[in-house]
Amino acid sequence: MIPLREFAVPKIVSSKCIEFGACRYNGLLIRSSVVENLKKHVEFHPICPEVEIGLGVPRKPVRVSELDGRISLIQPATGLNFTGRMHEFSGSFLNSLDAVDGFILKNRSPSCGIKSIKVYKGFENSRPLTDGVGLFAASVMEKFPQIPIEDEGRLRNLMIRENFLTRIFTLADFREVRESGDFNDLIDFQTRNKLLLLSYNQEYTRKMGNLLSNRGKHSIKDMKDKYGEMLVAALAEPQGVPSNINVLMHAFGYFSNNLKFPEKAFFQDSLQKYREGRLPLLAVINLLKSWMIRFDEEYLLKQTFFEPYPEDLIQVTFIFDRMA
């Protein structure tokens, strides 16, 4: 299908071992079709925190341990503690970032893992807890609490992947407005993204509209700053199925009087399959897009909800994945 929009280029920090360099502790490169497909749409900044703090390739494994009540990064084979180095690197690197729209980190890594990391007691081989976070990942989450952060394992899940892609391309779009746009560009952004924002958070969508309606009370810089804070907050929680269905039904209302009964029935059946988790959101969106083009619905054609990210990033292989 012909794209309905042009896309800004997201800036993404990724673990270097995922499709960029053979720098895992065992010298391997990790494959990810999601990251590979993103390369033509995204400006990647690949980084390996463990290599950056002086560990070689290959290397003796490091792990997260609790030492004297503190979470630490240690190398059991050598007895070395790399906690200080990792904290120093993480702070320096993250503070140096000019702009970032998201992170893709290595799952289950003691440095980059974002969840379910094994945490041991000291240097002993005791039974670990499994609710830890990698040390570098923890610094990322602390500094960028509302920026999209995922690992390559979770991105195999359809719903997680759709949400991540939608957020990074929306934030990249706003970043361009923030850097060089004027008030009219802010209005245009709000207009194009209205249905998308409603599918995420109706309260923040209303607040963002109210902010723009009080133009005289803020400088353009203050307005961009306030709007940006609301935007990341609005996108912080994933889209809910009920709110998506409300938006889909709203759009369906533009054509319902012009459709035949079998077309209406097919749409309702598709909507029910999406509600039950048997059909991805973008399958229903594509059905509506065909009618948008057929009936030349200009307002809907401009809505980013119907093409939140480039269509060639859609992967249907994992339609039946469950939430990680």
Image (cartoon, rainbow, N blue to C red):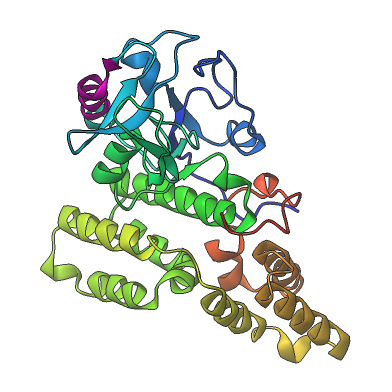
Residue 306 image position (x, y, % from top left): 61, 64
The picture quadrant where one finds residue 197 is bottom left
Residue 41 image position (x, y, % from top left): 56, 36
Q: Is residue 82 in the magenta section?
A: yes
Residue 264 image position (x, y, % from top left): 79, 86
The magenta segment: 80-93
Measuring 64% from the left and 74% from the top, which residue is drawn there? 297
Q: Is residue 18 above or below residue 300?
A: above
Residue 270 image position (x, y, % from top left): 76, 76
Measuring 17% from the left and 33% from the top, which residue is drawn there? 68
Q: Is residue 272 above or below residue 185?
A: below
Instruction: Report the number of numbered marks.
Output: 0
Measuring 33% from the left and 57% from the top, which residue is drawn there? 232
The picture quadrant where one finds residue 109 is top left
310 lies left or right of 211: right
Q: Is residue 299 above or below residue 258?
A: above
322 lies left or right of 47: right
Q: Main secondary structure of the magenta part?
A: helix
Where's the C terminus, which quadrant? Answer: bottom right
Closer to us: 42 or 240: 240
Q: Is residue 175 above or below residue 320?
A: above
Q: Is residue 211 in the magenta section?
A: no
